[in-house]
Amino acid sequence: MQAAIPMLVPMEMLTKAGGWGNLISSISNMLGPVLGAALMGLIPIAGIMLVDIFGAMFAIVCLLFVKIPDIPRSAGRTHLLSDLKEGFGAMRQNEPLMAAFGPMMIMTVLYMPLGALFPLLVRAHFMGAAWHNSVVEFSFAGGLLISSLVIGVWGGMKNRFLMAGLAIGLLGLGCFVGGALPPGGYWIFVVCCFFMGASGTFMNVPVMAYVQESIAPEMMGKVFSLMMSAMTLAMPIGLLIAGPVSETVGVDRWFFWSGAALMLAGVLFRILTRPYDKITRLPEAGKECR
């Protein structure tokens, strides 16, 4: 396990910062389509494209006022395979992260198809119309938004990996209940979608905060790239599995059994990461993290 490194941001603030970052992202994702639709009724498409350009320019100007520390770089030219190898080496030295990585990959494979299958479940099982699916999507996004606000203010549990394991279990429970509902249980499913959306923040933010505090700055980009690449690869794998299975057994059955598997993944996450509670727990106020 790599020793924790000095951070520009106190460790107890990393989770809160991640929550606020997720909050901004959630608000942008919710307001973007609404503003785009409103602008299409007011100005031509060329003007809308200019809005994107001016928005990017505004973001760049804002970054000019942000002081970004210099991160040590390895000498010589960089190579993709060698960078991935170095990132994997850094992950292997970080035992808590390696323990969490396997269950997180299982969760990603099962979680990613849900967004694509929401409309099918609403239409085929709950006999809903287009607006029913809009309500489901809004509830899911609302869960992301509220949970990000909660994390930003509260900061999360001291035991961050316990919180992540519980969040995976909550995701599985929402999916499990949604798949078990009868056709008349649409509004209960809407509530389940809220908690499924909220679980993403409670799982992702504490794990990412732990990576930030436990991986050396010069290796952090490589580790994040490796993790994101692995989870991106898990998306099509999940869709390849979910498509044929849901078509064979029904979308509701896919939600039901994937929910059960997600709850088991949450239990596995907790079992594998529990030996590292003292390492991954946030330090008490005034105490130094070892």
Image: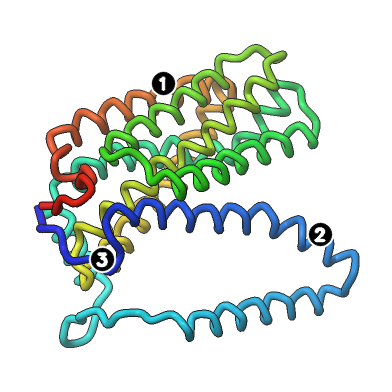
Residue behind mark 3: 220
Q: What is the quadrant of residue 253 in the picture?
A: top right
Give the mark, 3 or 2, whose residue is nearer the N terminus.
2
How far is the residue under mark 1 from the one under mark 3? 33 Å
Mark nearest the camera among 1 and 3 is: 3
CB of mark 1 within 8 Å of CB of mark 3? no
Q: Residue at x 52, y 25 (%)?
A: 255
What label sits on residue 207 in the rendered view?
none
Q: How is the image coloured?
A: rainbow
How far is the residue under mark 1 from the one under mark 2? 39 Å
Q: Residue at x 23, y 46 (%)?
A: 282
Q: Secondary structure at mark 2?
A: helix
Q: Residue at x 46, y 30 (%)?
A: 171
Residue behind mark 2: 37
What type is the residue that disc 3 sits on?
A: Met
Residue behind mark 1: 260
With respect to residue 105, does 263 lie above or below?
A: above
How far is the residue under mark 3 from the one under mark 2? 38 Å
Q: Secondary structure at mark 3?
A: helix
With respect to residue 105, does 124 lie above or below?
A: above
Q: In this rendering, would 228 be left or right of 6?
A: right
Q: Secondary structure at mark 1?
A: helix
Q: Picture coordinates of residue 11 (x, y %)?
A: 27, 56
With respect to residue 195, does 100 lie above or below?
A: below
Q: Residues within 10 Å of mark 2 (few under 14, many from 20)?
A: few
Q: What is the quadrant of residue 120 in the picture?
A: top right
Q: Picture coordinates of residue 35 (x, y %)?
A: 77, 61
